[in-house]
Image (spheres, rainbow, N blue to C red):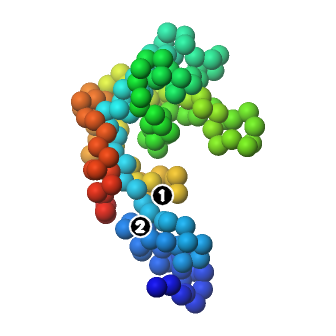
Amino acid sequence: MKNYFATLEDAQQWLEKNRMDGVKCPCCNQFVKVYKRKFHGSMGRVLMLMCRAHWTGKTDDDGYTHVENLLVALGNNTKGVQGKMKYWGLVESKPPATTDKKTSGLWRPTHKGFLFAQNRVRVPKHVYVYNDSVLGFGNELVYIREVLPEKFNYQELMDERHV
C-alpha cells in the first residue's frame, strides 16, 4: 500500500516518527532507518593495529595507513570496521585524491582514538546512526579493555528493532 501525503513536510514528519523501525520513504522509496551500532572487540583490535602501525612508522607522512592492506598482511579478515569507528570520533579518513571516490582507503587514529586504544578514556558503547550521520549516543561508557573480548554478532545487530 502506498502512503500519500499532502505535502513534503507531512512525509518528512512521518519519516521522523517511523525511522527507528525502518520504512521506505514515500517520496523516493529509499529505505530509511536509524541504526544502533555497538562498539565491539573487532573494532578495538583494528584500532589497536592502526595505532601500532603509527607508532612503528608503517604509515604515510601524515600518519595514514591503508587499513585493508594492513589487515590482509596480518591475516585478519575484519573488513570495514574503520569506517564505523569514525562515528565515535576515533579514526579519520584521508580525503580522496579525486572526487569520484568516497574515501581514499587511508585512515588514521585521532587523538581520542589513541587515548581510547591506551585505555585512558571511555567511549559510548552504542551510537545511533542515520544516513551516515551520528544522531546520538547511548549512556553506557566502556574502556577498550572491556570490549576486546567481545566478538561482532551479526544476529544481535539485525535484531535491533528499536532504541
Front residue of 2/135: it is 2
Q: Position of residue 152 (x, y in %)?
A: 31, 39
What kind of residue is marked 1?
Tyr
Q: Is residue 139 visible?
A: no
Q: Residue at x 55, y 87 (%)?
A: 5
What kind of residue is marked 2?
Gly
Find the residue positioned furthest to the bottom.
6
Q: Is residue 134 visible?
A: yes
Q: Residue at x 60, y 81 (%)?
A: 8
- Give the quarter of the image for residue 129: bottom left
Instruction: Report the quarter where the C terminus lies.
Output: bottom left
| Secondary structure category for the residue under label 1 | strand
Relative height, residue 14 to residue 139 (above, below): below
Q: Residue at x 28, y 35 (%)?
A: 151
Residue denoted by label 1: 130
- The disc label shown at residue 115, or none: none
Q: Residue at x 63, y 17 (%)?
A: 60
Residue denoted by label 2: 22
Q: CA distance from mark 2 to mark 1?
A: 11 Å
Relative height, residue 151 to residue 24 (above, below): above
| Secondary structure category for the residue under label 2 | loop
